[in-house]
Amino acid sequence: RVDEPGGLSPEMFNSFVKKAGGYVSAPVGLQVDMNGNFVSVHCLRTGTYDFILPFTADVVNVKTGESLAHVKSMSLQLTGGETRWFFLHRRN
C-alpha cells in the first residue's frame, strides 16, 4: 500500500526481517507479545497461521489447558479479534 509510512507495508517489513535472518513468528495478521515463558497472540485478520516459536518448547494453552509437547511450530486457526495465551516451557 502506498499510504504506509515510508512505503514499507507490514508484509514488506515482515519479508525484509525474515530475509535478513531475523525472527518472524507468523505472517502479517497477528499481533504477538512474548517473553521466554509466555505468548499472547492477538488475531488481526481471520485465517490459519503457522506460528513458529523461537525455540522448541512444551506449549500449554492457558484457556483450555491443552498441551503440546516438544514443538517448534503450531498451526493456529483464528478469528479476527480473538486472543490466545500460551505458556512456554523451553526444551533442549
Image (spheres, rainbow, N blue to C red):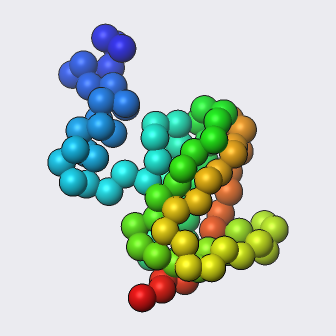
Pinpoint residue 23: horizontal percent, then vertical percent.
32, 57
Answer whether residue 87 is visible to the viewer in this image.
no
Q: In which quarter of the image is residue 61?
A: bottom right
Quadrant including the N terminus: top left
Pinpoint residue 48: horizontal percent, then vertical percent.
63, 41
**Residue at the limit of the structure toward the top, as seen here:** 2
Answer whether residue 20 is visible to the viewer in this image.
yes
Residue at 37% across / 31% down in the picture? Answer: 10
Left or right: 19 as drawn, with respect to 83: left
**Residue at the limit of the structure toward the bottom, as seen here:** 92
Q: Is residue 89 above or below residue 29?
A: below
Residue at 23% across / 38% down in the picture? Answer: 16
Left or right: 38 as drawn, with respect to 77: left
Residue at 59% across / 36% down in the picture? Answer: 44
Left or right: 39 as drawn, with respect to 17: right
Q: In which quarter of the image is residue 67?
A: bottom right
Total marks placed: 0
Quadrant including the C terminus: bottom left
Viewer-nearest residue: 67 or 64? 67
Left or right: 11 as drawn, with respect to 38: left
Pinpoint residue 31: horizontal percent, then vertical percent.
51, 46
Q: In this view, does 91 lie above or below 81?
A: below
**Residue at the limit of the structure toward the left, as seen here:** 20
Q: Quadrant of residue 84?
A: bottom right
Pinpoint residue 66: horizontal percent, then vertical percent.
77, 72
Residue at 30% across / 30% down in the picture? Answer: 12
